[in-house]
Image (tube, rainbow, N blue to C red):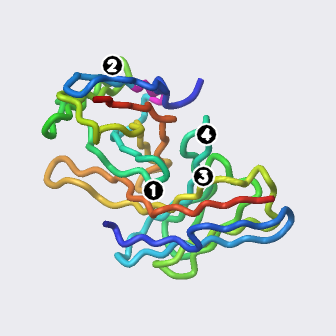
Amino acid sequence: RKEVEQDPGPFNVPEGATVAFNCTYSNSASQSFFWYRQDCRKEPKLLMSVYSSGNEDGRFTAQLNRASQYISLLIRDSKLSDSATYLCVVNRRERAGGSYIPTFGRGTSLIVHP
Amino acid sequence: DAGITQSPRHKVTETGTPVTLRCHQTENHRYMYWYRQDPGHGLRLIHYSYGVKDTDKGEVSDGYSVSRSKTEDFLLTLESATSSQTSVYFCAISSTLGQGAIVQETQYFGPGTRLLVL
């Protein structure tokens, strides 16, 4: 079983729709969680952190459920410019005081059409 | 912008030749990483560094070596390139995010190097 799993999609939605992505992780020692966005032929860019209390940034809401070991991303009022691949990232420390080692999901593709 | 550059940005080489990719950062970050990204596999960690001359292996380190003689530069070497190493290679640094009770480390990526091994 892959350590971080995402539905690859694509999710094909009209402008204005609400869309949600989930990501599951297998290592209960994971410590921090993020969503990244990656446009075609570009580098991944940090979209937002994910906290147990949930966090919101404009149209984007991220949530962490440690008990069930999944994180989610909700996008409201989708725009054409939201079309991209969304990567789930889970960090853990290799050892006390050591570097965080991130594990990336394979990404979920979102296509927003007019 | 985390001040990360990669060179070259594109390279075509032949099987069996050595290849070195360079990652350069300008903000004195301690941690640096090399990833490869392939369709169906996503981003996979090759090697990482936690300081000058301190490196460790990642998930897919076979066939790759790294060196970090200065804080700002992290080099990835393919000693004898193979067609299976055709990929997009990303360098990343780790930086702290947030403040107060909630401080996290997260990564910022360079623009990538597209490598084709014929």
In terms of secondary structure, what is the magenta stretch mainly? strand
- The residue where tag 4 is placed is B39
The label nearer to you, 3 versus 2, is: 3
Q: Quadrant of the C terminus of chain B?
A: bottom right
Q: Quadrant of residue A21?
A: top left
Amino acid bearing label 3:
Arg
What secondary structure is found at the residue carrying circle 3? Answer: strand
Which is more foreground, mark 3 or mark 4? 4
- Name the residue tied to disc 3: B36
Choose between A34 and B117: the one closer to the eye. Answer: B117
Q: Nearer the viewer, residue A96 or A49?
A: A49
Identity of the residue drawn at 42% across and 63% down: B93
Is disc 1 in contact with disc 2, using a CB cutoff of under 8 Å? Answer: no
Q: Left or right: where does residue B25 sit relative to residue B13? A: left
Q: Which residue is mark 2?
A: A67
Q: Chain of mark 2?
A: A
> Residue A21 vs residue B47: left or right?
left
Q: Residues within 10 Å of mark 2 (few under 14, many from 20)?
A: few
Question: Which SS class for mark 2?
Answer: loop
Disc 1 residue type? Gly
* Highlighted range, magenta: A23-27
Q: Give the residue at the far bottom of this rendering.
A: B70
Chain containing the residue with disc 3: B
Q: Nearer the viewer, mark 1 or mark 4?
A: 4
x, y percent for residue A53:
17, 30
Q: Are marks 3 and 2 on the same chain?
A: no
Task: Work out whether disc 1 and disc 3 sit on a shared chain.
Answer: no
